[in-house]
Amino acid sequence: MMKYNRIFCVVIDSLGVGSLSDAPAYNDHNVDTLGNIARACGDLKLTHLTKLGLMNLHCVPHNKPANMPDGYYLKANEKSAGKDTICGHYELMGLHTTHPFQTYTDTGFPKALIALIEQQMQVKFIGNKAASGTHIIQELGEQHISTGELILYTSADSVLQIAAHETHFGLDRLYQVCEAAREICSHDPYLIGRVIARPFLGEDATTFVRTSNRKDYALDPSVPTLLNELQDSNYEVIGVGKIGDIFNLSGLTKSYHSDSSIHGMQQTIEIAEKENFSGLCFTNLVDFDSLWGHRRDPVGYMKQLQSFDEQLGTLIETLRSDDLLILCADHGNDPTYTGSDHTREYIPVIFYSTSFNGSGLLPISDDFCVVAQTIAHNFQLDDNSLKGKSYLEYLK
């Protein structure tokens, strides 16, 4: 029998809780997104996250655990080969990525690949290197405006990012170029996880700013995810924020674009207050990652966590007795670490319902798929091909 009618899964994008054993293989040493933010900033003052058990789950300097936490909580190990957004979200929804996508961090994209896109879309590229998105716009934005040449860059992830000015180049035209690049990069030998449109505004290097019209073009999942399983069983599957981009709308019955993580939480709260459905609301809050993790800004990350914590209190107040809230992450992005890329870490998984009679620490999960299988088990989708193990039996 179904225990929970509505499940809200909120991804605090990049909130890792300590190095995985294989982190050194990814050039990550002593990384700890949550812990190192506290070391850099002191008391985080996260009232609701603390009450749910986050500080009981992970030893966080300057922060005390709750005496009687309200949630069940655990750490989950990443099984997939990689530490990027797609790998993390696919794994949360029941898939293991065994072969990492192509990366071009050290060399830039091959000339043959660039020529294919340029010839098909009648454009020219500048840049073609691994870079911070804000820095490369400051470096090349004025040249882009004067010549019309698009800014091409990547990172340590499997991403091809194209930046262009919204008005001087045109937002729709940027999307068209990215759609063409997505098709080309969906096949060997250029199998790239995401193509990302990065529009910006401003008139010079001192005023350039990226806008909320970013658009991700991801590969379709190779096999059905939990989202598809739920949709095929006639459950509602609502995506909020970047979820629609990550899964190419596959398995979603509704998708809401968010302008920011604050907006994404506002949308989630409104869904909880107003929408009667049976199924899953799946929310990604990307600002933690894109604004603070990649930019190596622990203070900004801390403030974003505090804003989220306030909104979390409001969301908790709207939950019904047959609702289940799941808080988790998709990878780490330690803002105190070197470089600007994701970090290979455990993620927190916190379960909460107003109907709980108990709480406490649960066993470490072998993979992120604990989220998918717990949701699948609740909705009686036990005959599925998803990886992982359900923890529903622990939630009492």
Image (cartoon, rainbow, N blue to C red):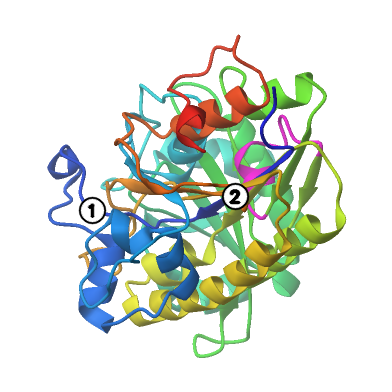
Q: Is residue 137 visible?
A: no
Label 1 residue SS: loop
Q: Position of residue 40 (x, y in %)?
A: 23, 79
Q: Is residue 312 left or right of residue 346?
A: right
Residue in view at x 24 percent, y 67 percent: 60
- Eyeballing the image, is 166 above or below 328? below
Q: Quadrant of residue 317?
A: bottom right
Residue in view at x 70 percent, y 27 percent: 2
The amino acid type found where label 2 is placed reads: Ser
Residue 151 or 244: which is nearer the viewer?
A: 244
Query: Within 10 Å of the Cα at label 2, are there few (<14), some (14-19), or many (20+) other Cα atoms?
Result: many
- Eyeballing the image, is 117 above or below 125? above
Q: Position of residue 20 (x, y in %)?
A: 21, 42
Instruction: Report the residue that reaches farthest toward the bottom.
Output: 206
Q: Position of residue 44 (x, y in %)?
A: 35, 78
Quarter of the image with the N terminus in it: top right
Q: Which mark is residue 353?
A: 2
Residue range in magenta is: 241-253
Q: Is residue 371 visible?
A: yes
Any magenta on residue 157? no
Please name which of the two marks, 1 or 2, marks the residue nearer to the observer. Answer: 2
Query: Within 10 Å of the Cα at label 1, are there few (<14), some (14-19), or many (20+) other Cα atoms?
Result: many
The amino acid type found where label 1 is placed reads: Gly
Label 2 residue SS: loop
Q: Quadrant of residue 132?
A: bottom left
Instruction: Report the residue that reaches farthest toward the front.
Output: 357
| Disc 1: which residue | 18
Residue 105 or 327: which is nearer the viewer?
A: 327
Residue 67 or 283: which is nearer the viewer?
A: 67
First-in-chain label (1 vs 2): 1
